[in-house]
């Protein structure tokens, strides 16, 4: 039986950011990752002003800013029955699209201790029985193991739900430059919505939401088939959009069902049991419609480390702390995050349905709800500051 003070399950963005935040507060932790290396695969992570504030607090923003262009505008083009409508909003605060690879590596290189271990899928928490026979007893267990979280199952959190659509993500590289404006451009034609975000002057992150998700499970592992399915769904799009898919890095493609936790689940979910809690997608998986999945996970990390350090103190650390004090720290974390996450999940849910529907009446109703709940500015949520470590 190996005893470790703080165990973080999952070596993605939330897990590495939480470990780094604890490290900066002088608290050691160990990250357990199912894979044999740090998970740096994936596509683009839209990071808005609140996410950059969290990265400032984590001390890695200066490494990441030079890797991506600043985004100045969001533009949405809707084409229905031959009619074009365009909506545009300037972005005054900082917004960039980061490569997930760059973000994960920056978090990992800044001081997190990574241990690569294959977790037994029947593990019982908070005592972790690892697949190669090692048993770990943790003082604190933090589940950052994504939408299919084993720790969330241990907490008996409500299961995630699925939007009735699939999503494709990928990168397209233009050796001579793409020439696209520094904006998030979304275009919806028929039942397909696609978007593109410049990362650098040569690299573009693009995505497509496919209304017919029946083939997701069939072609999800075949990247050539994913490209063909996407092109078929985008057959009515302009040529430059189709060329973007044709010229993409096929190995960067991923196809998956869009998942979310409902606002009610987040409002009433019991995110702490004993000294076990969750962060990131394990706590609040949400669709990509307002670009807050990654930024919200970074906020979680800062708040969680601050609450633990405040309750545990600088001298005795975790070793001298009782389960009661640790539980109080985790309760502070959950209470501070809950309403913020309810707001983000509600805005994401309504925006997702707004972008998907073709009904004018439904669009007007959803717009009214969004204005009443969140005001006329669609970027108000990005002005949130999770506070210093």
Image (tube, rainbow, N blue to C red):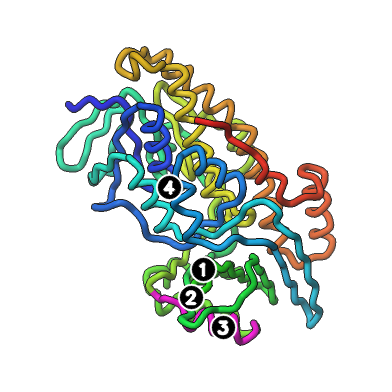
Name the residue that disc number 4 marks.
Answer: 13
Cα separation between marks 2 and 4: 23 Å
Q: Is residue 241 magenta?
A: yes
Vertical comparison of 165 with 301: above or below: below
Which type of secondary structure does the marked residue at label 1 adopt? loop
Q: Nearer the viewer, mark 1 or mark 4?
A: 1
Name the residue that disc number 2 marks.
Answer: 172
What secondary structure is the magenta-colored segment mainly?
helix
Q: Nearer the viewer, mark 3 or mark 4?
A: 4
Ranked by sequence position, the earlier of labels 3 and 4 is 4
Question: Does residue 53 appear to the left or right of 220 in the view shown?
Answer: right
Q: Give neighbour class at mark 2: few <14, some 14-19, many 20+ (Cα, 10 Å).
A: many
Question: Could you tell me residue 26's position as x and y percent?
Answer: 36, 27
Which type of secondary structure does the marked residue at label 4 adopt? helix
Q: Residue drawn at (64%, 33%), measured in percent from left and top? A: 339
Name the residue that disc number 1 marks.
Answer: 200
Cα separation between marks 1 and 2: 11 Å
Q: Nearer the viewer, mark 2 or mark 3?
A: 2
């Amino acid at each position: 039986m190996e005893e470790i003070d703080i165990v973080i399950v999952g070596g993605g963005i939330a897990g590495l950011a939480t470990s780094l935040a604890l490290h900066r507060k002088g608290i050691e932790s160990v990250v357990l990752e199912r894979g044999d290396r740090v998970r740096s695969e994936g596509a683009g992570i839209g990071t808005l002003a609140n996410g950059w504030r969290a990265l400032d607090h984590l001390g890695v923003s200066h490494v990441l800013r030079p890797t991506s262009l600043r985004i100045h505008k969001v533009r949405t083009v809707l084409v229905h029955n031959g009619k074009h409508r365009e909506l545009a909003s300037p972005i005054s605060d900082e917004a960039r699209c980061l490569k997930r690879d760059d973000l994960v590596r920056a978090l990992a290189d800044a001081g997190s201790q990574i241990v690569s271990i294959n977790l037994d899928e029947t593990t019982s928490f908070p005592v972790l029985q690892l697949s190669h026979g090692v048993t770990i007893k943790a003082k604190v267990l933090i589940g950052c193991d994504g939408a299919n979280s084993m720790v969330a199952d241990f907490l008996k959190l409500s299961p995630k739900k699925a939007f009735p659509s699939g999503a494709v993500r990928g990168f397209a590289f233009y050796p001579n430059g793409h020439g696209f404006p520094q904006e998030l451009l979304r275009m919806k034609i028929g039942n397909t919505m696609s978007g593109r975000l410049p990362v650098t002057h040569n690299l573009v992150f693009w995505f497509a939401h496919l209304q017919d998700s029946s083939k997701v499970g069939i072609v999800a592992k075949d990247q050539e088939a994913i490209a063909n399915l996407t092109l078929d769904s985008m057959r009515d799009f302009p040529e430059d959009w189709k060329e973007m898919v044709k010229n993409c890095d096929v190995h960067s493609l991923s196809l998956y069902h869009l998942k979310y936790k409902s606002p009610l689940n987040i409002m009433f979910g019991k995110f702490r049991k004993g000294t076990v809690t969750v962060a990131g997608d394990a706590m609040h998986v949400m669709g990509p419609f307002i670009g807050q999945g990654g930024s919200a996970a970074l906020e979680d990390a800062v708040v969680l480390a601050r609450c633990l350090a405040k309750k545990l103190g600088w001298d005795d650390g975790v070793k001298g702390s009782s389960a009661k004090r640790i539980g109080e720290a985790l309760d502070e974390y959950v209470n501070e995050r809950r309403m913020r996450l309810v707001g983000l999940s509600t805005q994401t849910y309504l925006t997702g349905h707004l972008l998907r529907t073709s009904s004018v009446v439904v669009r007007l109703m959803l717009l009214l709800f969004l204005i009443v709940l969140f005001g006329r500015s669609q970027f108000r949520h990005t002005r949130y500051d999770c506070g210093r470590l």
